[in-house]
Image: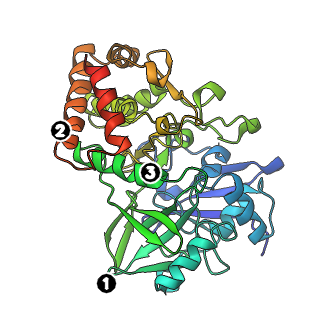
Amino acid sequence: MSRAEALGVWLDGVRVAELRRGRGGGISCRYDAQALDRWPANSPVLSCSLPLGPRPRDALAFCRGLLPEGDALRAMAEQAGLATNQTFELLARFGRDVAGALVIAEEEPEERRFEIERLDREGLARAVEELDEHPLGSHDDSELSLAGLQDKLLLVKLADGTWGRPLHGRPSTHILKADDPHRPGLVEAEAQCLALAREAGLTTIDAELERIGERSCLIVSRFDRGGGPDQVHRIHQEDLCQALAINPDDNRRRAKYERAGGPRLRQAAELLDSYSLDPLGQLDRLVAAVTFTVLIGNADAHGKNLALLHPDSEHVELAPLYDTVPTALWPKLRGEAAMSIGAQVSLAAVTLADIVREARIWRHPPERAEATARATIDSTVAALDAKVIPPSSPVAALVREQAHRLAS
């Protein structure tokens, strides 16, 4: 692979910026002239951490957030013959289909290069079994990346409902998550939480459980993709770590968690207050997201599991909920909230008063916050009453218990 010194960044088919390799593994971002002419200064075109301006900005944390973590990163780096800290080089290899709407490449992307390898049931099962060796389903003909630790496979849903593997930067439409052999039932529990969140108006993600080969798998639609099978379009987004220029690998501190220097809810609120078209409405949505996180006992709602959508290049809004894992059902998993709520760090101890106290920190009206939290509790319980998920499931029991505790 050639050693590129600069990579172009395309947004909706238009080149808007350039990434350049820096010393010591650094990456700088400079916006192109046409971007400077098109949008007002300080617009979050690529990221809230990279506001529009003529000077180059440090983009390492944002770029690092486009890559997976842990074993998946190590496997992808090994596949490319690179080290895991060679972020620039990894994006040169895998940057044509990343989270959000950006395409990162040496040369202008060409849709005519897009291809799809159709997967029959045997091929899909083989791809799932090979995830350790080929994270995200990446092979020599793949140019894709996605953040996260969990075993995932990027797929394209075809017009006939079958699945394909995206090639040469073709946008994926769905993410397959294989069940954790150490925590069986995790993907089923996540699917149930997504169903509740969808019924409560907190996500737009479609989720389906399938038995593929020997493993239970959850397949979810990507909220950063739109259109039909034949004409997929990318929707720009970034996670909270990227928006705040926090490198999740910083000093190996797992800095996506607040206690390790990661994001706080207050910082998410500040971004929504600064950049959204409807700050009050967006802060209501953040209150609802926090309340739902407590209801399902998700202690892993860290800075990479909370995202911002960019509906245009000047504004942001809270993304639909995703990665809704009820960690409370696995006692050996962390019990500390990934982001404190009203200064409370024990997720099981969070009260309605804590949620309102947290909203006060954002300068959000407390009576409005309480009303939103109670409405979220009511809508989630209504989803349980409507049997959106099996009434006898551990998730249903957990949510009812949490709802009773919060509402009392």
First of labels 1, 2 by sequence position: 1
Mark 1 or 2, which is nearer the eye? 2
CB-based contact (under 8 Å), mark 1 and mark 3 = no
Viewer-nearest residue: 116 or 195? 195
Residue 89 visible: no
The local crowd at label 2, few if under 14, some if 14 to 19, many if 20 or more residues have their Cα within 10 Å, is: some
Residue occupying the point 61% across, 74% down: 107
The residue that disc 2 covers is 382
The quadrant where residue 104 appears:
bottom right
Give the side of residue 203 with respect to residue 50, left or right: left
Give the side of residue 382 with respect to residue 324, left or right: left
- How far from the left and from the top, in percent, is residue 147? 58, 54
The residue that disc 3 covers is 237
Viewer-nearest residue: 187 or 90? 187
CB-based contact (under 8 Å), mark 1 and mark 2 = no
Amino acid type for the residue under numbered disc 3:
Gln
Give the side of residue 75 with respect to residue 323, left or right: right
The local crowd at label 1, few if under 14, some if 14 to 19, many if 20 or more residues have their Cα within 10 Å, is: few
- How far from the left and from the top, in percent, is residue 197? 30, 44
The residue that disc 1 covers is 160
